[in-house]
Image: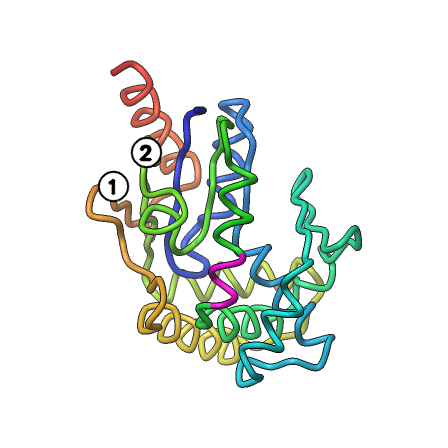
């Protein structure tokens, strides 16, 4: 079994940036589980399905699904979905579909298969609590809503997406509400997670703190 690091937290708390950099520093694999949820949500939407569709229909659509996550790109049945999942709409779709037990059951199994026997940094919302409950190190990143809105707005602008600050704030509040109050695998820190508030921290400061924790765990 490899050394597994779980990084959880709400949208725009810094998970993706930190997870990618941490994996690079350690020479570990990296998995963004949010990208897999976005891709599956877009895939189901393209098939004319919605979160209110019959469970049997969704189950049938997921039954032969194959997900690959390679070098930061996500593929469904061989098709690259990376560009399709970048919009705010994809994020909302992912949050809506992620509430369904049938969707989470399929994706948790796939995510565990991707992580099996690897040195890996895995980011998401239920990694330490559900996907990798025995991870060697569990981190829960958080930040103020204001800081997260600013970060998400910059991210969208960098991608050339035209969104307002108000739209981003509404999106994050909605996703926080859905992710933390859903019945299946709600967003919450694992009991043994290290909670880090990134509001006033630089990326380098967060990374240094986690690297120190990794070294401590690897040496015990």
Q: Position of residue 5 (x, y in %)?
A: 40, 35
Q: Which residues are magenta?
A: 102-106
Q: Secondary structure at mark 2?
A: strand
Q: Is residue 206 above or below residue 96?
A: above
Describe the colour scheme in one phrase: rainbow
Rendering quarter of residue 101: bottom left
Q: Secondary structure at mark 1?
A: strand
Q: Is residue 204 above or below residue 167?
A: above
Magenta residues, dominant SS class:
helix
In the displayed structure, does residue 201 sit left or right of residue 48?
left
Q: Residue at x 39, y 41 (%)?
A: 6
Q: Position of residue 100 (x, y in %)?
A: 46, 72
Q: Residue at x 35, y 35 (%)?
A: 135
In the displayed structure, does residue 198 sit left or right of residue 168?
left
Rendering quarter of residue 51: bottom right
Residue sitting nearer the eye, 39 or 168: 39
Rendering quarter of residue 136: top left
Q: Is residue 58 magenta?
A: no
Residue wearing tag 1: 194
Q: Residue at x 60, y 81 (%)?
A: 50
Q: Residue at x 60, y 73 (%)?
A: 58
Q: Is residue 52 above or below residue 66?
A: below
Q: Position of residue 163 (x, y in %)?
A: 61, 75
Label 1: few (<14), some (14–19) or many (≥20) C-alpha neighbours in 10 Å: some
Q: For the residues marked 2 and 1, what is the alpha-carbon distance in whole angstroms?
A: 8 Å
Residue wearing tag 2: 137
Quadrant of the drawing holding the N terminus: top left
**Mark toward the viewer: 2 or 1:** 2
């Amino acid at each position: 079994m490899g050394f597994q690091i779980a990084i959880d937290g709400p949208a725009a708390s810094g998970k993706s940036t930190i997870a990618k950099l941490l994996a690079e520093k350690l020479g570990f694999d990296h998995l963004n589980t949010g990208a897999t949820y976005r891709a599956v949500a877009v895939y189901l939407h393209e098939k004319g399905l919605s979160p209110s569709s019959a469970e049997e229909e969704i189950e049938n659509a997921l039954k032969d699904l194959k997900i690959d996550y390679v070098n930061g790109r996500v593929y469904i049945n061989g098709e690259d979905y990376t560009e399709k999942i970048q919009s705010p709409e994809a994020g909302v779709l992912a949050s809506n579909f992620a509430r369904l037990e049938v969707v989470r059951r399929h994706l948790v199994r796939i995510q565990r298969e991707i992580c099996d026997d690897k040195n890996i940094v895995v980011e998401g919302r239920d990694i330490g609590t559900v996907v990798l409950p025995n991870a060697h190190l569990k981190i829960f990143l958080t930040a103020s809503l204001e800081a997260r809105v600013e970060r998400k707005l910059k991210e969208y602008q960098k991608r050339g997406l035209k969104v307002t600050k108000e739209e981003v704030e509404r999106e994050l509040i909605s996703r926080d509400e859905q992710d933390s109050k859903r019945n299946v695998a709600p967003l919450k820190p694992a009991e043994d997670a290290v909670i880090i508030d990134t509001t006033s921290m630089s990326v380098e400061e967060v990374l240094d703190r986690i690297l120190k924790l990794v070294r401590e765990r690897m040496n015990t």
